[in-house]
Each structure stands twice: as C-alpha cells, then as structure tokens.
Image (spheres, rainbow, N blue to C red):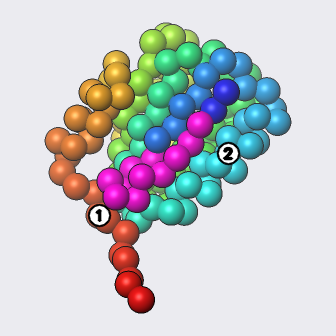
C-alpha cells in the first residue's frame, strides 16, 4: 500500500508506505514519487510515514535508494520519517547515509509537520497568474 501527494502550498511531499510492497507496487510508488516531486520547488521537504511498512528485499532497497537520490537531486531539503518497525527504520536510515539526504524522526504526522515548520518555510513554487 502506498499514497504519495504533493502540497505545493507548503512545498512538501507526503508519502505513506505500508505492508510488503510487491515489485509492481514499488514501481508504481516510484512513478508517483517522481510525478509528485515534479510539482514542488527546490527546497521541498518530505514527510514519509513508514509506520506499517515491512522490511523489503535487496531490489526494493535499490529502488528506494534511487527514489531518495532523485529527491536529493531535485532539491529535497529534509525528510521527516514516521516509523515504528525497527528493521524498516534501520533500512531507511542506511539509505539516508547513502544518499546524503538529511532526515528527522517523528512518531506522528503532527510531530513531523511541526518539525518541518520549525525549520522555517521551504521556498514556495513560483506562481504566474494569467
């Protein structure tokens, strides 16, 4: 199970990953990440809820590393990760060291948003009217 959505007003990407993602679902999730990241300006932040995500296999890890690397290249500033399953959390922490993308831990969505709000506003996307 996955859900990915961009909030251009906050310049923030919200992602929820849960269960055991099969290869087809991982590919669909990666496409959703790329599509939603394209809606945000450099300096965007990510809230990643992996509370119910089961540990993944080597191929799943490779794909997740590619997604995090793409987020870094596209200008992600910080990831706040909501997690409870220790092995899943450790897998994501290892990926963060590989990609160099800063992350913060949180226990709830509200805590994640508060951590990012405390960093100050990320740059908002340029809007042109008319």
Q: Locate residue 24: give its quadrant.
A: top right
Give the label on residue 30, or none. Answer: 2
Q: Is residue 105 above or below residue 8?
A: above
Q: Position of residue 2 (x, y in %)?
A: 63, 32
Front in this rendered view, residue 65 or 123: 123
Q: Is residue 18 above or below residue 115?
A: above
| Residue at left offset 71%, top offset 19% | 20
| Residue at left offset 79%, top offset 27% | 22
Q: Residues within 10 Å of mark 1 (few under 14, many from 20)?
A: some
Q: Disc 1 versus disc 2: distance between alpha carbons?
A: 24 Å
Q: Residue furthest right?
A: 24
Front in this rendered view, residue 66 or 30: 30
Q: Position of residue 110 (x, y in %)?
A: 29, 29
Q: Quadrant of the N terminus?
A: top right
Front in this rendered view, residue 24 or 89: 24
Q: Quadrant of the C terminus?
A: bottom left
User: Can you see residue 44?
Assistant: no
| Residue at left offset 24%, top offset 35% | 115
- Name the residue carrying label 1: 123
Report whether 109 appears left or right of 17.
left
Report whether 85 appears left or right of 60.
left
Give the label on residue 51, or none. Answer: none
Report whether 92 appears left or right of 31.
left
Read off the magenta span: 3-13
């Amino acid at each position: 199970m996955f859900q990915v959505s961009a909030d251009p007003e906050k310049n923030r990407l919200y992602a929820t990953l849960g269960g055991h993602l099969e290869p087809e679902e991982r590919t669909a999730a990666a496409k959703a990440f790329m599509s939603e990241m394209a809606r945000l300006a450099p300096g965007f932040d990510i809230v990643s809820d992996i509370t119910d995500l089961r540990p993944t296999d080597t191929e799943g890890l490779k794909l997740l590393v590619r997604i995090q690397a793409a987020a870094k290249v596209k200008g992600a500033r910080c990831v706040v990760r909501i997690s409870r399953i220790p092995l899943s959390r450790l897998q994501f922490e290892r990926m963060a060291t590989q990609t160099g993308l800063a992350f913060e831990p949180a226990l709830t969505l509200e805590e994640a948003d508060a951590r990012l709000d405390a960093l100050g506003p990320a740059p908002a996307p340029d809007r042109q009217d008319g």
